[in-house]
Every structure is written in structure tokens, then in C-alpha cells.
Amino acid sequence: MIIAVDGPAASGKGTLAQGLARHYGLPHLDTGLLYRAVGVATQAYENDEQFETRAISAARALDATHLADLEALTSAEAGNLASKVAVIADVRRALFDFQRSFATQPGGAVLDGRDIGTKICPDADVKLFIQADSKARMERRARQFESRGQVVDRYALFHQIEERDARDMHNPNGGFYKADDAHLLDTTQLSIEAALRAAIAIIDKSMALKAGERQFS
């Protein structure tokens, strides 16, 4: 079973995907970490004419060992860098096979990101699109940073989220929009536990319907 979980930053998709992977006994890939790793690897060239070339090289050389430093990869700066490298077509092409190979391993997988249901796994068994309003997402991310002892400027963080949303939505090489067959789940007013229960209910119902269709086809 392949489960695709898409949505904007801090919508709760990563936490949900992890919970779903545990519930169904499937491996999980946070595909955003791939772009964050490429962004971090090219940070020194952010304002340099070599930025795009360096990002493409980093994407082509990426392997699982580059995803180990979660503290560095989950910083606000890494998120901004990720959205900058994600608009580079050759970066996306370089990372496609990595993601597709993970998704199609025996037994399936859970992947979360921006374009899983639209580009990476358009054939996923179940697709979820997770959303939440910008203020709620800002507060979640702020609490995440504060739990690490970081001082947070909520005003700046809110605008970073809004800017990243705009950049991601207008990415000509991405697919950041809700797939036609994706189930929408708004987590603005939901706790982690409630959101996970809702997601499991959607998946179980969807898989039961598909099993019924196969039985009578």
C-alpha cells in the first residue's frame, strides 16, 4: 500500500505520515528532507551564480547518509533553502528516482511532501492533502523551534511561511496542488491524535471501498 501525504509547511503532514507509517507498519520518507539536504549543501552559494549548478550536483550525489542531521535539516533556514532549490527542474529530476524507488519497495510506503500525489506517486493507493491556516502553522513551527531552546520572531516566521507558500504554489517544475482524487484534511482545529484518527479513518474507508470494487469487478 502506497500512501501519499501532501500539504504546505507545518500543516502537520510529517507528523501524520509518521503516525500512519507506525499504524500500518510501513516505511516512511519525509521527501522534504531531500530538498532541505540539497539546500543546506548549497547554502554557501545561495547568492552566487553557481547556486543552481551546485544544487543540481548535490541532488545527484544525495544518499540516505545526507539525511541524518535532523536538527540542521529542520531549521527555518533549511526550509527556505529547500523551496529555492525545489524550483530547479534538474534538482527535481535528480530526486525523482530516489523517491519513486522508496515508494515502490515491496509492501509499499508512506511518503509526505509537496507533490507526492501529483508527481511522484500519482498511482498511490490513498492520497491525503493536509492543510491548516497560516497562523496555526506559524504557531506550531514556533513551538517546535522553542522546544529546542531557539528564540522565535513570530512575525518574521509568519511571513516566511506565507512567502514559502507563494514560492511553492508558483513553482513551474513542481506539482504543489491537491490531486483530484486526494482526500482533504484540515488540521487547523485538530490535535495530533485527532488528526491521525481522521486520517486512518479516511484510509481504511478508501481501502475497503477499493477491495469491494475489486471483489465485484
Image (cartoon, helix red, strand yellow):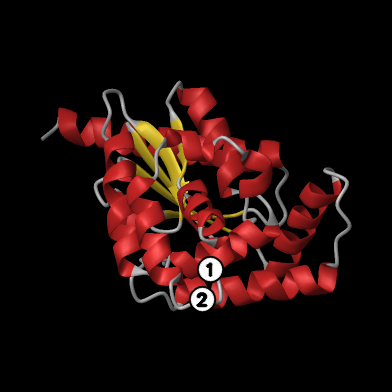
Q: Which mark is residue 17?
A: none
Q: Give the left or right position of residue 148, taking residue 115 as reference.
A: right
Q: Secondary structure at mark 2?
A: loop
Could you tell me if the residues under marks 2 and 1 are in contact, i.e. CB atoms within 8 Å?
A: yes
- Look at the picture and state if 168 lies above or below 202: below
Q: Quadrant of residue 90?
A: bottom left
Can residue 84 be seen from the camera position used here?
Answer: yes
Q: Give the left or right position of residue 141, taking residue 150 as reference.
A: left
Residue picked out by circle 2: 48
- Look at the picture and state if 36 lies above or below 29: below
* Quarter containing the C terminus: top left
Query: Residue at point 36% right, 61% down?
Result: 56
Q: Give the left or right position of residue 144, taking residue 200 as reference.
A: right
Q: Secondary structure at mark 1?
A: helix
Query: Residue at point 62% right, 77% down?
Result: 163
Residue picked out by circle 1: 45
Can residue 180 be seen from the camera position used here?
Answer: no
Q: What is the three-letter code of the residue carrying label 1?
A: Tyr
Pointer 2 local density, CA inside 10 Å: few below 14, some 14–19, many at least 20: few
Q: How many marks?
A: 2
Query: Residue at point 52% right, 59% down?
Result: 39
